[in-house]
Amino acid sequence: MRRFAGRWLAGLDPSTRRGVVRVVVLLCLTPLTVILANRSFAIADGLGPAAVYGTAVLAATAAMFYVAYTRYRDPAVEQVPCPRRLRGTFPPLPEQPRVSLLLAVRDEEARIEECVRSMAGSDLPGVEIVVVDDASRDGTGDILRRLAAELGITVVHLTENVGKKHALVRACARADGDVVVFTDSDCVLAPDAVRRCVTALVRNPHLGAVSGHCRALNTDASLLARIQDVWYEGQFRVAKAAESAFGSVTCVSGPLAAFRRDAVWNYLPAWAEDRFLGAPFRFATDRQLTGYVLGQAWHGKRLKERHAGSPFVTGEDYPERPWLVGYVASARVGTDVPAGVRAFLRQQVRWKKSFIRNLCFTGGFMWRRGPGAAALYYGHVLWVLLAPLMAVRHLLWAPLQGLWLLTGLYLCGVLLKGCAWGLAYKADHPGDTRWRYRPLMSLLSSTVLAWLLPYSLATVRRGVWSRGTS
């Protein structure tokens, strides 16, 4: 049935096809719309801020689904629109640009060979591969030496640990690509993944960077790994797709991140030397590097002046442009996710620290990138910031006051949101029963992960080079 529907849609002209998709998505969102209407009447009757918060979260979720499923276009498959005011602003890439695929690694002997072989297995000819071994203490260096001799890749062995950001910048110093692609040491790239990202950038000159689509590799490791896998699918297929519809993906994720050289090159020293609250910010935050692409029209000159002596600035000064940033759903990459609770919590703390740091940069200009992009960004920020307060109110204060019904209603709302995400997964993957894991992630996020934001803020100046999964 799904194949028949797909063939029928493919036979329609583009405008009619998009209209049919909009109608179908609206019908699918009808249950959420009914719930929102009921909640709105309840708010009108005088319910408190918690009801307003819950209604706003459901409304934002429904709006994100609508945008993701009706406005998103895969830039590797078709050209995505460029705002009229920006047309002619962006120079086209060569039809066959030079491509550099870069990796920084430390103590990853268990996965590194599969990762590097997947890099070398790209179906895009002529890809330059540079791997920097950041003073590994296990057998990673020996594996890389063997692979360098076999595959003809460039491997740089550092004798002193410099951290992931500095290691990646050293890889960039050895690269000469018009397009620079990053991946992580615990990832495996699909053979066509790099080609699809490059195609997206060539076909759409207004895109300064694109993110690929990531899923978990180690889903057999634990229930927690399976929960994360389904969560990743939604974060990319829905959240990044919605951002991409406005050309403002705020995090080009490390497992597969492709940048035009002229969009990112001058800002690599600012990324490597980034400081926050008076101390070096050591995490290799993907959000911050993406922020330099999104915000260089307003902050680019200042960032380059701050690092005017760097070869990345003096070598060639690229003009600051109002780049768009997209997401390539067809560019697939797998990554090991934390299978154990401790590793998972450490990862979440790192991500929340990166969120806090990036908020202080990207939050200052996202309002300039249009109402759609701003609504998605600041809506997400508001949800993250209010989540700890909602957890305190509903999971601590309410039980202490004997208001167990309020706690129950809060948890039901969390599960309802999770079910909506789960049904979106099921719609994209009919017959796949893993959609049932998605409500568990929503429950975990609201009851456990929400508490990590205050802790992350209190410890934001701590940072380590760590990618453990157990």
Image (spheres, rainbow, N blue to C red):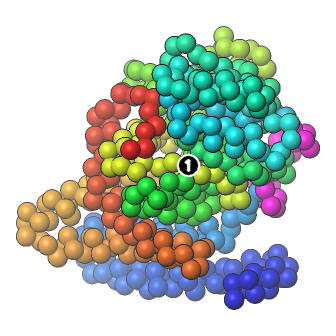
For the point 56% across and 40% down, which residue is it? 111
Q: Is residue 216 magenta?
A: no
In front: 97, or 64? 97
For the point 47% across and 82% down, which residue is it? 33
In front: 323, or 413? 413
Q: Quadrant of residue 67?
A: bottom right
Q: Is residue 415 left or right of residue 306?
A: left
Q: Is residue 34 above or below residue 175?
A: below
Magenta stretch, residue numbers: 76-97
Q: Is residue 172 left or right of residue 414?
A: right
Q: Is residue 86 magenta?
A: yes
x and y percentages locating residue 99 in the rendered image: 80, 36
Question: Which quadrant does the N terminus fall into?
Answer: bottom right
Q: Residues within 10 Å of mark 1 (few under 14, many from 20)?
A: many
For the point 50% across and 43% down, which residue is it? 363
Question: Which quadrant does the C terminus fall into?
Answer: top left
In front: 138, or 380? 138
x and y percentages locating residue 327 in the rendered image: 67, 54
In front: 211, or 138? 138
Which residue matches tag 1?
335
Q: Is residue 177 left or right of residue 227?
A: right
Instruction: For residue 449, say whether it is visible.
Output: yes
For the point 53% across and 63% down, which residue is it? 234
Instruction: For residue 264, say whether it is visible.
Output: no
Magenta stretch: dominant SS?
loop
Element at badge 1?
strand
Q: Is residue 323 above or below residue 327?
A: above
